[in-house]
Image: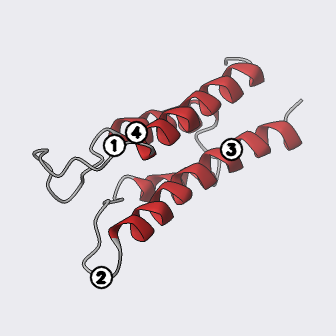
């Protein structure tokens, strides 16, 4: 198993990637018209693998599994408000993992 510091640094790197993607304009010309932030899928998958590689039985895994279904478009209301909630949701899970490591792991 890798060190606690490795997992924290990797999670922080994933968070930086999410923030970077969030700062870009949505790409409605991509092949995934319903997901104008298609890059996010890989970051979410990599984060899920990071948490799973740390501890396969960690309850957080079941919540992260749901992140793979995130779509960055909304049939209702403002796209930007909807997208902000989705980005916040991903960042929340990353922050939770970092907090877990800092609070409970020596």
Using a 10 Å C-alpha cutoff, classify the residue at mark 4 as few (fewer than 14 neighbours), some (14 to 19) or many (20 or more): some
Residue 82 image-quadrant placement: bottom left
Residue 44 lies, in percent from the top left, at 43, 42
State how far apart marks 1 and 2 are (Cα): 22 Å
Please give the label number shown on residue 97.
3
- Most foreground residue, 69 or 65: 69
Q: Which residue is depicted at the point 24% across and 54% down?
A: 35
Lateral position of residue 39 relative to residue 15, left or right: left
Query: Does the CB distance between marks 4 and 1 fall below 8 Å?
Result: yes
Q: Secondary structure at mark 3?
A: helix
Q: Earlier in the sequence, mark 2 or mark 3?
A: 2
Residue 60 lies, in percent from the top left, at 61, 52
Q: Secondary structure at mark 1?
A: helix
Q: Earlier in the sequence, mark 3 or mark 1?
A: 1
Q: Secondary structure at mark 4?
A: helix
Where is 49 relative to 36, above or below? above
Lateral position of residue 12 relative to residue 64, left or right: right
Q: Earlier in the sequence, mark 4 or mark 2?
A: 4
Q: Secondary structure at mark 2?
A: loop
What residue does disc 1 label? 41
Using a 10 Å C-alpha cutoff, classify the residue at mark 2 as few (fewer than 14 neighbours), some (14 to 19) or many (20 or more): few
Where is 31 relative to 35, above or below? above
State how far apart marks 2 and 3 are (Cα): 31 Å
- Most foreground residue, 76 or 1: 76
State how far apart marks 4 and 3 are (Cα): 15 Å
Q: Residue furthest bottom?
A: 76
Which circle, 3 or 1, is nearer the viewer? 1
State how far apart marks 4 and 2 are (Cα): 27 Å
Where is 70 relative to 46, above or below? below
What residue does disc 2 label? 76
């Amino acid at each position: 198993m890798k060190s606690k510091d490795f997992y924290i640094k990797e999670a922080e790197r994933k968070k930086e990637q999410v923030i970077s993607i969030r700062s870009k304009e949505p790409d409605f010309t991509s092949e995934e018209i319903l997901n104008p932030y298609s890059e996010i899928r890989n970051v979410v998958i990599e984060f899920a693998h990071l948490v799973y590689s740390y501890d396969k039985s960690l309850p957080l895994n079941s919540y992260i599994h749901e992140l793979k279904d995130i779509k960055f478009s909304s049939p209702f209301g403002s796209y930007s408000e909807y997208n902000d909630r989705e980005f916040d949701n991903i960042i929340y899970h990353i922050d939770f993992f970092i907090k877990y490591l800092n609070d409970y792991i020596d």
